[in-house]
Image (spheres, grey):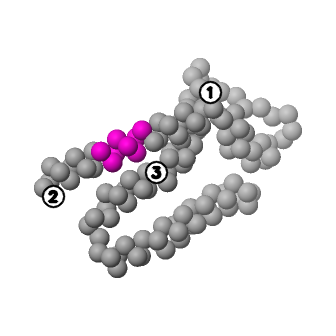
């Protein structure tokens, strides 16, 4: 493949990943109240009873919801994004290198999920 063909392939993979993120954001906006409640649950447990969140700028509440939806949409689209990365990189790998990808992805995913669970449920 020439350099331009590689760049065209990269552009195609990036566009697909961005479309997947947009779809994930759309889906996460359907469940935004549940997602916000889940994200803020540790904070609300730490606050005294009856405490409420305040917003110091007019658009801050909407911006918060948009940011959480973007993060949740990216998390929802992450498997498809990783698949697009794999489809871009795989042709350049040897067979023995491709065999090492499965344990790497499994252990990396377990580590990330473990970190999320630790920070959400066990940290005080």
Quarter of the image with the C terminus in it: bottom right
Q: Residue at x 53, y 69 (%)?
A: 106
Q: Which residue is mark 1?
A: 61
Q: Examine the structure image and report whether residue 15 is included in the region drawn in magenta.
A: yes
- Which is more N-terminal, label 1 or label 3? 1
Mark 1 residue element = helix
- Which is more N-terminal, label 1 or label 2? 2
Quarter of the image with the N terminus in it: bottom left
Callouts 2 and 3 close, C-beta under 8 Å: no
Q: Which residue is mark 2?
A: 1
**Horizontal and vertical percent position of residue 101:** 42, 71
Q: Which residue is mark 3?
A: 80
**Horizontal and vertical percent position of residue 32:** 65, 34
Mark 2 residue element = loop
Q: Examine the structure image and report whether residue 13 is included in the region drawn in magenta.
A: yes
Question: What is the chief secondary structure element of the magenta stretch?
Answer: helix
Left-right relation of 27 to 89: right
In this picture, which residue range is highlighted in magenta? Answer: 12-19
Mark 3 residue element = helix
In-front residue for pair 99/31: 99
**Horizontal and vertical percent position of residue 119:** 66, 57
State the CA–CA distance, disc 2 to disc 1: 48 Å
Above/below status of 10 relative to 122: above
Above/below status of 82 relative to 73: below
Q: Nearer the viewer, mark 3 or mark 1?
A: 3
């Amino acid at each position: 493949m020439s350099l331009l063909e590689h760049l065209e392939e990269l552009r195609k993979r990036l566009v697909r990943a961005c479309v997947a993120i947009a779809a994930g954001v759309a889906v996460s906006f359907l469940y935004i109240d549940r997602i916000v409640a889940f994200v803020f649950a540790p904070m609300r447990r730490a606050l005294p009873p009856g405490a409420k969140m305040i917003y110091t700028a007019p658009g801050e509440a909407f911006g918060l919801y948009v940011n959480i939806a973007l993060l949740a949409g990216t998390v929802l689209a992450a498997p498809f994004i990783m698949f697009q990365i794999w489809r871009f990189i795989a042709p350049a790998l040897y067979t023995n290198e491709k065999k090492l990808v499965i344990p790497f992805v499994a252990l990396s995913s377990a580590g990330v999920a473990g970190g999320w669970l630790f920070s959400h449920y066990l940290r005080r």
